Image (tube, helix red, strand yellow):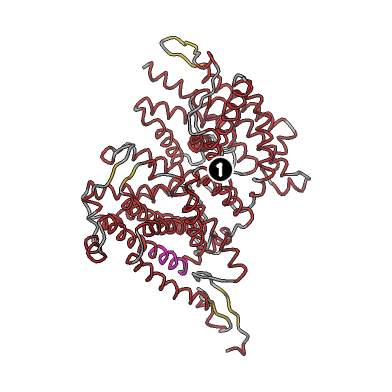
Amino acid sequence: MTGWLDALIQGVLLGGLYALFATGLSLMFGVMRLVNLAHGDLIVLAAFAILFVADKLGLDPFVAVLVAIPILFVTGFVLQHVLLNRTLGRDLLPPLLVTFGLSIIIQNGLLQVFSADSQRLRSGAIETASIPLGGGIAVGVVPLLTLMSAISVIVFLNFIFYRTPLGRVFRATSDDLEVAQLMGIDHRRIFAVATGLAFVVIAIAALYLGLRANFDPTIGPARLLYAFEAVIIGGLGSFWGTLAGGIVLGLAQTIGARIDPEWQILSGHLAFLVVLAVRPRGLFPRAQD
Amino acid sequence: MGDTAAKPAQKFRIETADGFSRAAAAGALILLLVLALLPVVAGRNLIQDLIFLFYMLALAQCWNLLAGYAGLISVGQQTFVGLGGYLLFALTLIAGLNPLIAIPLAGLVSALLALPTALLVFRLRGAYFAIGTWVVAEVYRLVFAQIKPLGGGTGTSLTPSVTSSVPGIEWVKTLLDVRTPAARDIVSYWVALALLATTLAAIYVILRSRRGLALGAIRDHEAAASGLGVDIYRIKLAVYVATAAMTGMIGALIYLQKARISPDAAFSVLDWTAYVIFIVVIGGIGTMEGPVIGAIVFYLLQHYLADFGAVYLILLGTIGIVIMLFAPKGLWGLVAERYGLTLFPTRRRLIVYEPEDR
């Protein structure tokens, strides 16, 4: 019984990580209808960036991420402005193919620079620290911080979207691009800012990815799939839905792993397919399409 | 449709082929004959390279029909390559069937499994459909990794008794005076050539038919096609299932040739989808000629640069992005626009006469 309760708690905490993966994807799709197939690889790229900064400057990953965030914001801004904005239009194919190409370039670029070795972000005692809850159950500090960060990121993004002028512009371009342009909005710059913000979320996701487990250049695509599944399970258009989707996915994986360790990933995928069959618009849908 | 509309006025007709494409058709028949007779003179390396080229081109034509015409951008076609491969192994190793019977059966079962798969992933629209198909491929990969009789996660090999049971090997051995492995390659080569020719012919016939007209309309403007009465959902479903059948058969052939299968290789997104997308985009999406050009370019790049590993893949990705941004119709698009050529006349052209012309 404790085993199952433990699986439930760990599942919810794992869901926090998946929600962080998914929020960046959700943000870019929400503002500019861009589905970024390189999203998972960008998370891995960011993890390597944090590792690089931490190694070179001798910083703790929690400090290194603060250095990496402005760099990643600028990277995202430039990537959107120079490359991705050119792909947007009525046709679906260009954004998909360009981000797919980007995914292959990032994976192999990382292989070339950092080799295929597994890496990990090291942060000393906090990595293994845990808080006992009694009854033989304990929650790790890093998983707990992951979930709390996911909630903070979502509160922050909701604040930007619904309480600031920038958020109003985001919602306007998302609702009707042409009318927004008529109102004098420079949508290219707005999209670039949105991608920059998504990269900040990616940096935070990468921090916890690297602290919780080993990573190597090839694991990006699987993170993209988890992010995508969390978005679809939660329902498009709501960051809280994405958090719920991440938690459902995390629960499915830990419960599956509890039955048979080899079934962890498969159970997550199957949970996604079941939601798709039963509630194709997700559990908490808000937006159309 | 065009014919009945054309009769009353007699002032215009619908033309597809022109002189150049008729010459190309004759050339294609000669090329097919030459390729069929090639093993008599060619070395084993060339035969193996051509098998690779043939199945990549066949896969590319299938993906092109799916993405270029029906607008179903899938990054999960490795599902059906892997499924076809595993079905071949199951049907020959466990059920004891002859490989040549197992190949069409693998195609049939792939199509049967594609139907429920489609009902699920078709709920996702546009770009999300793409990632959904990828999830499905992962599900199949993880499921096959659990099937112990087929080697589980590490995979399994075909026994020599299966690989040498393909009819014709003994005949080729005596006729061309070669050893068994070379004879096996030659028979695989012929099967690959036959499968490629069938795929090309099938897609050509589909595109020339009434359904093909509807597909072209979907490619050009989906909403307008729907407005003119094209049943978009049904036609997309039909294309998805048909390409699954073809892709499954190609997968079965690929793994008959490789004689060794594992879940990671059989359901590899890089090998069976990324390369294929690259071929179609480089050559020109939404035409039958494009993938042919793309496959040849890809074959040359692979032949000369594959040893560079990661750098080669970075180069492929970059070329793909550059083509998509600056020449979205691909290499064939550049040629065709300039000279107005068609090798596979699937496009209908309206020829209007002045009355005195007749």
The residue under label 1 is which amino acid type? Ile
**Left or right: A13 in relation to A91:** left
Relative to A250, say whether B29 is above or below. Answer: below
Q: Determine which residue is flagged by label 1.
A: A105
Residue B31 image-quadrant placement: bottom left
**Left or right: B58 in relation to B257:** right
Residue A174 image-quadrant placement: top right
Name the image quarter holding the N terminus of chain A. top left
Relative to B358, say whether B151 is above or below. Answer: above
Percent coordinates x, y for residue B341 in the rendering: 56, 71
The segment highlighted magenta reads B198-208
Which sits in the foreground, A84 or B319? B319
Which sits in the foreground, B74 or B24? B24
Q: Does the magenta stretch include residue B158?
A: no
Identify the residue shown where x is 33% and y is 64%.
B39
Percent coordinates x, y for residue B28 in the rendering: 43, 71
Q: Does the magenta stretch include residue B200?
A: yes
Identify the residue shown where x is 50% and y is 29%.
A215
What subunit carries mark 1?
Answer: A
Percent coordinates x, y for residue A76 in the rendering: 65, 37
Name the image quarter holding the C terminus of chain A. top right
Identify the residue shown where x is 22% and y is 46%.
B94
Magenta span main SS? helix
Residue A122 image-quadrant placement: top right
**Left or right: B26 in relation to A155:** left
> In terms of secondary structure, where does tag 1 sit?
helix
Percent coordinates x, y for residue B356 in the rendering: 62, 90
Mark 1 closeness class: few <14, some 14–19, many ≥20 residues within 10 Å:
many
Identify the residue shown where x is 60% and y is 80%.
B352
Relative to A126, say whether A270 is above or below. Answer: below
The count of marks equals: 1
